[in-house]
Amino acid sequence: MAPDHPFLTVAIAMVVLLGLVLSATRPPGVFEDGAGTENTAERSEADEERLPATGEPDQLTVVSPDALPGIEETEIDHDGGADVTAAYPNIPNAAPLSDFLDRTLTAQVNAFEAANPGARSFVGEWGITAAAEGIVGVRTTTTETDSEETREGHSTHWYETGDGTVNGSSHLLAGQAELAELNDLVREAVADTGADPSALHPISALYDSVGFNPDGDLVVEFDSGQVAPTDVGRVHAVIDRDEAEALLSEFGLRVREAATTGTREFTVAEAPEADKDGSGAAAPGVLAPRDDSVDCADPDTKCVALTYDDGPGGRTPELLDALAEYDAHATFFVTGHPVMEHPWVVRRTYAEGHELANHTLSHPNLAEIGSGAARSDLETTQALVFRETGYTMDLMRPPYGSTNGQVAEITAELGLAQILWSVDTNDWRDRKANVVRKRALKGASEGAIILMHDIHDTTIDASIDIIRELDARGYTMVTVSQLLGTTVPGETYVDGVPEPPETEGSEESEENSEEGAVNDAG
């Protein structure tokens, strides 16, 4: 029987036929889901390939070394007195990373031994926290044992496989302001953990182990004893992913992507083209003892350098408050034993833009002791400050201003210029604030280096007035490095006054001026 509507029947048949043709020719894997969204097998495969990162919510992510074919462990060479076992990962085609880790671990061991006469053992272990997107994260754990206690420390570095650059953890932050903002967040986060929030400052030596947990939250961890008593144990902070987002640099965002991506297998295809020393640009939290906005060579700028020896002392924080009030900076020639007693004050001094300089461990007369003892005294204090701040000092002041050819040779080898003074307040002898104040202000002139000691109460009282008065007189209070500019290791400097043209007898005159600075102070 013939259909009543032949044209309708033909149209329906054509639609059905067209549907069959489309079904037959549609690329494999394309389908409509229940929401009407088109997906592809390719996208599904990509999602399937992306593994979830592994790790605990309060820890950095963890990547199995088995995911990096050919990875080997290499131990550093060490012949010191402590028992040292320290190793790092050696990844094929990542020589800059290996070189960097070798140098860094070696420097840590040397600083540990130099700063701790009772150093017994040092153990350095490693783990991989990321291996994706052209980035490898290496987290090292160190265990130091001396005659008093055992401390555990952590640091995390991030390697870019393309150009061979190794970045410290503070590179994850966009800048110094962002690091300072993170520091505020961390202070809040650790307030109830037994840590002292006032021990936290935005410097890279504190923020040297920063990474991400599997959810992309920012994880910050500190060494034992660093911001809390050692018996408190591990101190850390977890900053929510969304809260940390605006603080991250472009590099930090890339690291987060890499750290939150699980890894089946990761290889470095080829070594970087250019030879590098493994380190990147200066990071947030690495502070210079000079302010680029101040030019002491400008005739309209009157610079003077306030310097303080023998500290830090119990009232040094009050002095730092006074300097901060007037946006003034000073140079602190620290002595090793007080550094051990007040490490957090040393950290704050550095964080607030002041200069740290070496005044030996135990304040000996360097010109009267053997070269080995003199070198050891200076090296120990170098190591103590480096371990607290990450800063390598390049200035020193010989106790009592006593120096000779041997001292000049040792300081030259250690990269330290010798800084004496042009104004001596004799505050160590005359413990009267008003007397100290008058001497400092009387001697203040453009280019002057003023000697005081922040271990005396009377000097702290006097300094508060001195800083206020110098500011009122239009002086800019700067660090010694700001005043002098580039210094030469081993050379001796008395002030920052421009040298007059050389005339006959000028050498004798200079020698007399230096001798005049040498007395029982310092």
Image (tube, rainbow, N blue to C red):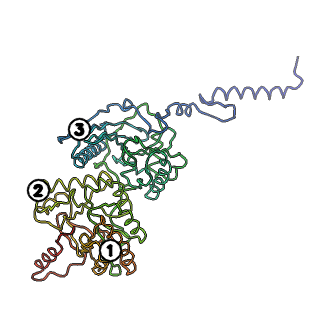
The residue that label 1 is drawn on is 433
In this picture, residue 290 sits left or right of residue 33: left
**Quadrant of residue 335 within the rendered picture:** bottom left
**Quadrant of residue 407 within the rendered picture:** bottom left
Please tell me which of labels 3 and 2 falls first in the chain.
3
Q: Nearer the viewer, residue 432 or 34?
A: 432
Q: Secondary structure at mark 1?
A: helix
Q: Nearer the viewer, mark 2 or mark 1?
A: 1
Q: Is residue 134 visible?
A: no
Residue 8 drawn at (x, y percent): 84, 28
The residue shown at (39%, 69%) is: 323
Q: Secondary structure at mark 2?
A: helix
Q: Residue type at mark 3: give it.
A: Val
Q: Nearer the viewer, mark 3 or mark 2?
A: 2
Q: Nearer the viewer, mark 3 or mark 1?
A: 1
Please tell me which of labels 2 and 1 falls first in the chain.
2
CA distance for labels 2 and 1: 38 Å
The residue that label 3 is drawn on is 84
Quadrant showing the C terminus: bottom left
* Few, some or many residues within 10 Å of mark 3 (<14, 14–19, 20+): some
The residue that label 2 is drawn on is 371
Q: Nearer the viewer, residue 252 or 18?
A: 252
The residue shown at (45%, 40%) is: 259
Q: Residue type at mark 2: give it.
A: Ser
CA distance for labels 3 and 1: 50 Å
Q: Is residue 492 visible?
A: yes
Q: Nearer the viewer, residue 257 or 397?
A: 397
